[in-house]
Amino acid sequence: MERVSGLLSWTLSRVLWLSGLFERGTARQPRIMEEKALEVYDLIRTIRDPEKPNTLEELEVVTESCVEVQEINEEDYLVIIRFTPTVPHCSLATLIGLCLRVKLQRCLPFKHKLEIYISEGTHSTEEDINKQINDKERVAAAMENPNLREIVEQCVLEPD
């Protein structure tokens, strides 16, 4: 009986492999990551710039291509955001990174690890800012500051 069961299992897997069903299953993976990336982008595109009346999408600080999602395991995902400040010496780049982090931590409907970076070569102090916006203790300390917290809340507030 075991032998028949094993032979049946092998035959079924071989038929599925030959019919291409296994390939189609693996081809679904990139589509799922693209859908999750679009889900992330939809959340961050409406964040308001701290000093202008525009959204980050309107200023092209964030674009669809700046969001990447990778599967860590079946339930967890790595979300990577690479944003581009409007000018290389933008004094509010850290605040924009903080807004991105707060909005995604609050709104993402799936378990995730979040990494936020300034696009390479687009800011004069990108390395320092990248460290700040990916340091949990610094983020927590920043959100304890009532003035900063109020600015972040205004930026991440959903438009009517």
Image (cartoon, rainbow, N blue to C red):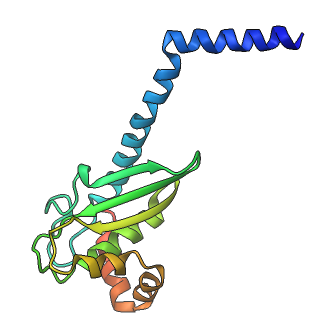
Snapshot quadrant of residue 147: bottom left
Would residue 160 be found to the left or right of residue 60 on screen? right
Q: Quadrant of the N terminus?
A: top right
Would residue 123 be found to the left or right of residue 80 on screen? left
* Residue 157 or residue 117, whichever sits in front: 117
In the image, what residue occupies the spot 47% across and 79% down? 136
* Residue 48 or residue 31, whichever sits in front: 31
Q: Quadrant of the C terminus?
A: bottom left
Would residue 2 be found to the left or right of residue 11 on screen? right
In the image, what residue occupies the spot 51% across and 9% down? 19
Looking at the image, the residue that sits furthest to the right is 1
- Is 45 drawn above or below residue 39 in the view shown? below
* Residue 38 is at least partly visible in this image: yes
Would residue 26 be found to the left or right of residue 95 on screen? right
In the image, what residue occupies the spot 81% across and 12% down? 5
In the image, what residue occupies the spot 43% across and 64% down? 114
Q: Position of residue 111 (x, y in %)?
A: 54, 56
Q: Position of residue 87 (x, y in %)?
A: 9, 73
Q: Position of residue 50 (x, y in %)?
A: 22, 77
- Is 142 drawn above or below residue 96 in the view shown? below
* Residue 87 or residue 100, whichever sits in front: 87
- Is 71 drawn above or below residue 115 in the view shown? above
Q: Position of residue 99 (x, y in %)?
A: 33, 72
